[in-house]
Amino acid sequence: MAQWIDICSKGDLQPNSGVCALVEGQQIAIFYMPEDNAVFAINNYDPFGKVNVLSRGLIGDIKGEVMVSSPLYKQHFSLKTGQCLEDETVTVAAYGVRINGERVEINLNGAA
């Protein structure tokens, strides 16, 4: 059973961009695409640059895969799975996230 944690208001999200939230000691990058009514959450840690910066990356898609490009070395990470699109051996954690009314909730145990 999913354990949903309230983390912020919908108004705290930046449309078509990322924000970072500290949830139970982990930095989580949250991306909001209002035109698709979509929200995604992955770990904020860039395993190539070895710093927490993924929330500052540019979002888009590659061949239909919604992704974020790291602001450091430009690797692309799937916002659905956390998989690095350039190196299949590298993945960042992806989390279940949802908008419930005007609140944003996350499930740290994985996808919804």
Image (tube, helix red, strand yellow):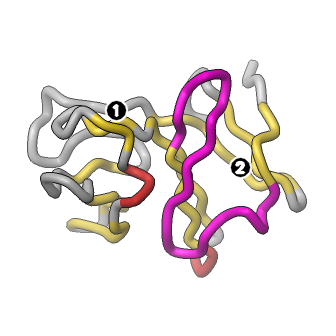
Label disc, if present, on residue 98 of the rendered structure: 2
Residue 64, position as x, y percentages in the image: 30, 67
Residues under numbered marks 2 and 1 in contact, where contact means CB atoms less than 8 Å apart: no
Q: Position of residue 7 (x, y in %)?
A: 76, 42
Determine which of the numbered discs, if any, sits on residue 92 in the image. Answer: 1
The answer to whether residue 110 is above or below residue 48 is above
Residue 49 position by quadrant = top left
In the structure shown, which secondary structural element does the residue marked by tag 1 occupy? loop
Q: CA distance from mark 2 to mark 1?
A: 19 Å
Residue pictured at 73% horizontal, 63% vertical: 12
Depicted 65 relative to depicted 79: above or below: below
> Which residue corresponds to the image point at 36% horizontal and 48% vertical from the top-left?
53
Where residue 70 appears, as percent x and y from the top left, is 26, 54
Helix, strand or loop at label 2? It is strand
- Furthest residue to the bottom? 35
Comparing marks 2 and 1, which lies closer to the viewer?
A: 1
User: What amino acid type should be assigned to the residue bearing mark 1?
Assistant: Val
The residue lying furthest to the right in this view is 101
Give the amino acid at mark 2: Arg
The region drawn magenta spans 9-28
Residue 102 is left or right of residue 97, and the answer is right
Residue plotted at (30% across, 68% down): 61
Dot 2 or dot 1, earlier in sequence: 1
Tell me if 9 is positioned left or right of 53 in this view.
Answer: right
Quarter of the image for residue 57 reads: bottom left
